[in-house]
Amino acid sequence: MALIERLTGTTWKEQRSAFVVGMGHGATHWILASLYVLLPYLSQELGLSYTQAGSLITLFHASSFAANIGSGAVVDIVGRHVHIQAASLVIGAAALVLAGLTDGLPWLLLSVVLIGITNNLWHPAAISYLSRAYPSRRGFALSIHTVGASLGDILAPLAAGSLLLVLTWQGTASVTALPVFGVAALVFVLLNDRGARSSEARPHDSFADYLGGLLRLLRNRAMVGLCVMAGFRSMAQNGLLVFLPLYLAGDLKVSPLVLGFAVMSLQIGGIFGGPIAGAWSDRTTRQSVALICLIASVVLFAGLSLVSGILPLIIIVLFLGLALFSVRPVIHSWVMDLAEADMSGSAVSILFGVQSAFTILVPVVGGFIADNWGLPTVFNLLTISLVISSVIVFFLPDARKSLQDFAS
């Protein structure tokens, strides 16, 4: 704890809010990671092909994209960051319960839609909250947010994989919903919006005033370039989360517990790398840290289709998680650097909306490619999206150094 305080300039007491929000973010990823682990088994029971299974995740991204349309505006106009965070968790937990109570595809589709709403209702409120609460250390604070995500992504596959040994996929879905309700209660009780008030932010005088701020965001070329770069990176990340479990279960025929461990290994690197990358970007530049992480991700992603055997694959996945997931807090901090304080929620909404738009077709198109040419081909195509993301970030300016010249 003393080392963290010294490196970040933030006392342990001051970090409490960041860790509570990180726990909530972990709960949202717990929900989604549970869905990813359940996907091979519900697909087998319902007789779904890779294309149809991928279509379920495409539906998730489509509903996430739709949720972005209004979530940022609600955060910036209403300002109830904590209430919105708690509500998003309750919706997601209820969606898992609904999935566990159904044995038909229509109700399962509704559950996937609600999980998509949870995912992108959370981010504008949470990232805006942390950015305002830690204005000079947002890289570190937002790295704690992503550490929570990695913990959720680690623990959920292990929990769901273990439960699948003794329960059906429906029973597993219902049980995994219970901790999320508890985290929602903690977020509501332990946080308050006073901790996220910013001296730079002011209430919008009217909806027209808000629209003016939104138009300025959309005209900012640096913001647009950053969101497009993040979209290509998100294609690789989400494609990996969808097709790695399918590859392990379908091609390598591993047990549910081994599958959960392999997916878990993807997140372990992000737990350690995220805070280092976030704090490092506070002291140097967002661009340099993001570029290093992305180039390493390209090299490691390319190795997925070149190795054989479960152990070498897990080792590559472990280091890929270190590089690929560490860049998330850097991107989020970069967006907050670019955004006006009273438009921070909408800036996050734009970022995640673009990411959802880029990833909507990845699961279904990847599923079609996997059905016809195999899953390694999907991994090769996802590598190309990371190459494009690296090229874009090379030409972007760091917001704190050359934003004015680039945006003019």
Image (cartoon, rainbow, N blue to C red):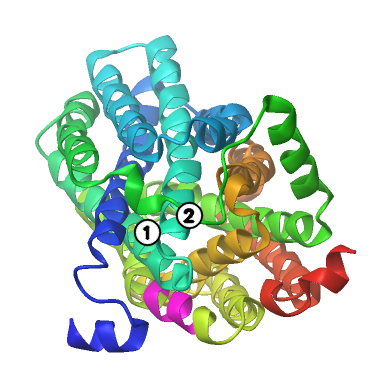
Quick check: can you spot residue 347? yes
Report if the CB atoms under discs 1 and 2 are less than 8 Å apart: no
Tally of numbered tags: 2
Please say whether residue 278 is one of the residues in the magenta stretch: yes
Q: SS of the residue at dot 1? A: helix
Q: Which residue is situated farthest in the right direction here? A: 408
Q: Magenta region, mostly helix, strand or loop? A: helix
Quadrant location of the C terminus in the rendered image: bottom right
Q: Position of residue 371 (x, y in %)?
A: 60, 40
* Residue drawn at x 44%, y 73% as measured from the top left: 137
Quick check: can you spot residue 308? no
Q: Position of residue 333 (x, y in %)?
A: 54, 65
User: Does label 1 or label 2 sit earlier along the sequence?
Assistant: 1
Q: Position of residue 381 (x, y in %)?
A: 69, 58
Residue 177 higher or lower than 265, as above or below = above
Number of the label disc, if any, that sits on residue 212: none
In the picture, measured across the screen, residue 174 lies left or right of residue 314, that is left
* Residue with the mark numbered 2: 198
* Residue with the mark numbered 1: 145
Neighbor class of circle 2 (other Cα within 10 Å; few <14, some 14-19, many 20+) is: some
Dot 1 amino acid type: His
Q: Magenta residues?
A: 274-280
The quarter holding residue 91 reads: top left
Comparing 5 with 248, the one in front is 5
